[in-house]
Amino acid sequence: MARKVRTSSEFRDALLKHLTYTMGKDPEHAQFFDWRMALSHAIRDRMVDHWVDSTRKTYEQDGKRVYYLSMEFLIGRLLEDGIVNLEMVEEVEDALDHFGMDMRTILNDEPDAALGNGGLGRLAACFLDSLSTIGCPAMGYGIRYENGLFKQSFVDGRQVESPETWLQEPHPWEFERPEVRFTLGFGGDVIYENGKTLWRPAELIQAEAFDTPIIGWKGKWANTLRLWAGRAVDPFDLGLFNAGDFAAAAEHEALARTISRVLYPEDSNEAGKELRLKQEFFFSAASIRDILRRFDSQHDDIRLLPKKVAIQLNDTHPAIAGPELLRILHDERGLSFEDALEIVHGCMNYTNHTLLPEALERWDERLFGRLLPRHLQIIDRIDDAHFKAHPQRTLSARSDGQVKMGELSFIVANRVNGVSALHTDLMKQTVFKELHALHPDRIVNETNGVTPRRWLHNCNPGLSRLITDTIGDGWVDDLEQLEKLEPSIRDKVWIERFEGVKAANKQALVSYVAQTHGVKLNPAAMFDIQIKRMHEYKRQHLNILEAIAHWQEIKDNPNGDWTPRVKIFAGKAAQGYHFAKDIIRLINDVAKLVNADHATRDYLQVIFLPNYNVTLAERLIPAADLSEQISTAGKEASGTGNMKFALNGALTVGTLDGANVEIRERVGDDNFFLFGMLADEVMQRRMMHDHAQQAIAADPRLARALNALRDGTFSPEDPGRYTHIADNLTWSDYFLVCSDFTDYWRAQREVDAAYRNPDKWAEMAALNVARSGWFSSDRTIRGYMCDIWGAESLLA
Ligand SMILES: *Cc1c(COP(=O)(O)O)cnc(C)c1O
């Protein structure tokens, strides 16, 4: 107790000092923003002590370092993470209390760092947290986008995008490193000189580093996230300026900055791709130089590189790092091509995230060759070397006028991993079938996970407290300890507390939605939530069609014994993905009609919350009763949203897709609502040319729901608005919404029945919590360390 009082006043002084000297304010006039900045700086100071220690230890031990290259890091807020990981919650509350401030209010002032689209970027962020918690010496490399993923709002139910401006306010977590700069090039020529091949790029640009410390659980270790920003080599042309051409004088600078200006939305296969390829090379090449510089500072023999360096490519976006490292070793450092390739192969590993053919990266070889002429030659030589070793091969990194980043990554990598058991199997059978036959040991599986600090301990304090009261706090960095909860689940008092936590979380969400959107949700209803990027394969339209059919059935019999539901949606659609945007509008139109319907609104409410991001996910997931994970089987590589929900005591209605398969295996068939075709049945069914018409003919409910789309029920002022959705589902339906509808309906009625037995439901939900410990990203990272990187923890 004595210690707490002392440190608390110490921290109070630190806070006041930053308010005064960093923000230049006195407490009388400080705004929330000033307090948040002062608090962030005071917390950052504490992080830095650990950070410096970890860095020193890493250099001393000279162990293997892990480099995680990712185009996206969907981090969210950082202040609460820092406070909790440093075990400073009480100190901070006390200090703020002294100045009459409330911690929650200050935490809620922080904008999300939205440097990612969805699952892939969020995985990278969870991995950073786990790498630091485990004490694995590692660094994340990415791009410091000035504008992250766009902000979403609705006008007449339609998605409207506006720029995300997280850097408009100063970002307290980063350290600018003007001394860490690399000059990179594009275009130009390849020249041959004294028997050497050299690339002479035409356009030069600099990459400047910005570092953010990533602190692990209990502050035992801190790694670095290093993001690159584009800078002009020669920022300002004084000659042009003096000649009076001010615009041209600044043009060079502006061009250099565009490279780190915006995050590309996924699923946008539009023009403007050149910038995307430039971004990929920009951050990959800067990272490779940084890795080599650090290696060279400690070692003389480049052949040791694979012993000291493991590079993980998060999807193919950084795949050009392989040829770039090869180019430096061969062209610039004079190693033979074969030796250089062997070193590169020893360092590089590749995580595949998708089997969707349209999402596998391919570049037109003319565009590629124009920007990266030497790399195109190197890719040909990689293909040649591979062919020499395996003359029977049929796939290559460059063919049909395209550079294929998936094949390139596979051929270069030491290990290739999928992100769930099913996905890894399908990868072996489909996209990489031939390459897998040549390299049967290369593919491994590392099922995704989520960090239990953010996705249970911090976002669900009520449940966290109950768990800690029951089994101690060892679960926070050893999540499989949750299984020790199982005996308590049969205890009536315990399960009542568990139900109380869920009820309180739902009530908190009800208040939030009432305040922010003016909609009153029924807290006694089942909270049925689907939140994720909008995509046809994720099938938000299956969900809303079922809701329409359900609403129609309730209307037929308004005095029936219905189980009340609140259907909650959130998710962004890529700007150019019109079908997905129309589904958003449809859900909003359905919500408008259904929520106003006096005959049904006690039983069914629908709401689409705008601007889905990490912070909104942290609000919604603890309040969920039902988690919708309904993708077409074979299409979702893993999913991580599914794990967050199960861990927070929601039951899943889902297909056997991605990690749903493993979630169901672990939580038990009885505690998971399964429906739908299996991945191989999907492939079979799709061969049937009239699969959708047959499904519609066999299910009058489905036919009636589709008719409501056609007859303008949801858009009386514009009756044709949703005809094309109905037509798409009737005549094409690639994602088999119709074929899975009937079984989905059945599963949802089972869900209704189960929810009417609250004791049974709570028991099932609690079993989901107790049995989801395996889905910690700590477990995933330990898997990578052991199977892929050969890296070790530096914590005793
Ligand atoms: C977890 C998460 C995702 C991934 O969700 P899936 O359901 O696995 O697609 C996407 N966005 C945010 C903000 C997340 O937190």
Image: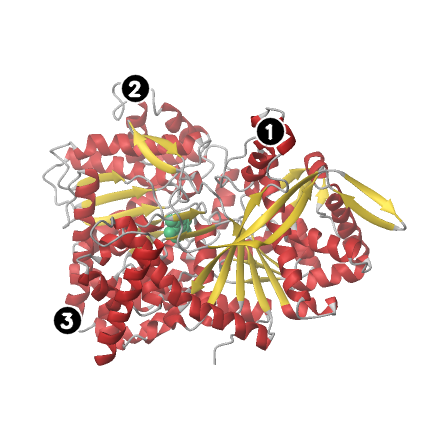
Amino acid residing under circle 1: Phe
Q: Position of residue 612 (x, y in %)?
A: 34, 44
The residue sitting at 29% across, 62% down in the picture is 15
Amino acid residing under circle 3: Lys
Q: CA distance from mark 1 to mark 2?
A: 58 Å
Q: Name the foreground residue: 321 vs 464.
A: 321
Q: Within 10 angstroms of label 1, few (less than 14), some, or many (20 or more) residues?
A: some
Point out which mark residue 492 bears.
3
Asked if residue 299 lies left or right of residue 355, the reply is right
Of marks 1 and 2, which one's residue comes earlier in the chain?
1
Point out which mark residue 231 bears.
none
Q: Name the foreground residue: 576 vs 217.
A: 217
Q: Within 10 angstroms of label 3, few (less than 14), some, or many (20 or more) residues?
A: few
Amino acid residing under circle 2: Pro
Q: Quadrant of residue 231?
A: top right
Residue position marked by numbered label 1 in the rendering: 241
Image position of 633 with respect to 425: above or below: above
Q: Secondary structure at mark 2?
A: loop
Of marks 1 and 3, which one's residue comes earlier in the chain?
1
Residue position marked by numbered label 2 in the rendering: 719
Q: Name the foreground residue: 288 vs 596.
A: 288
Q: CA distance from mark 1 to mark 3?
A: 78 Å
Image position of 530 with respect to 301: above or below: above
Most distant residue in the left direction: 559
Asked if residue 529 lies left or right of residue 536, the reply is left
